[in-house]
Amino acid sequence: MIKAFSKVSIARNIESISSLKEVKKLSTKDGYCVVNANAWAVAFSLTLDPTKSWCVDNAGAAREVSVTSEIKDAIDTARVACNF
């Protein structure tokens, strides 16, 4: 089953990116999103393996990322990019 991105309104976040002065973070149980004026990254837990997530960022990264304890570990908030 494919999970829809209904828990995060990506369109609404993209509209507000240009006016951001600081890093903004949005978190749900299954997903995490970080945006600033220059970058964005979003990660969602994989249903079959909660120790892994799928992360996508504005630099074009789209990859599976292992997480140690929380979904937010998939994103480097200082760089606003997917962790490697």
Image (cartoon, helix red, strand yellow):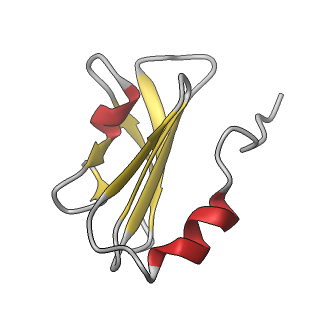
Residue 15 appears at what percent x and percent y?
A: 60, 76
Residue 62 appears in the rendering: no
Residue in the image at 28% along x and 74% along y: 21
Looking at this view, is 2 or 15 the one in front?
15
The image quarter in which residue 60 lies: bottom left
Residue 37 appears at what percent x and percent y?
A: 35, 78
Residue 7 appears in the rendering: yes
The image quarter in which residue 34 lies: bottom left
8 displayed left or right of 84: right
23 displayed left or right of 2: left
Looking at this view, is 21 or 38 the one in front?
21
The quadrant the N terminus occupies is top right
Give the farthest residue toward the right: 1
Is residue 27 positioned above or below 75 on the image?
A: above
The image quarter in which residue 65 lies: top left
Residue in the image at 36% along x and 56% along y: 24
Residue in the image at 78% along x and 41% along y: 4
Give the farthest residue toward the left: 78
Is residue 63 positioned above or below 74 on the image?
A: below
Is residue 14 positioned above or below 24 on the image?
A: below
Residue in the image at 65% along x and 64% along y: 12
Residue 79 appears at what percent x and percent y?
A: 19, 62
Q: How many marks?
A: 0
Residue 54 appears at what percent x and percent y?
A: 50, 42
Is residue 18 positioned above or below 33 on the image?
A: below
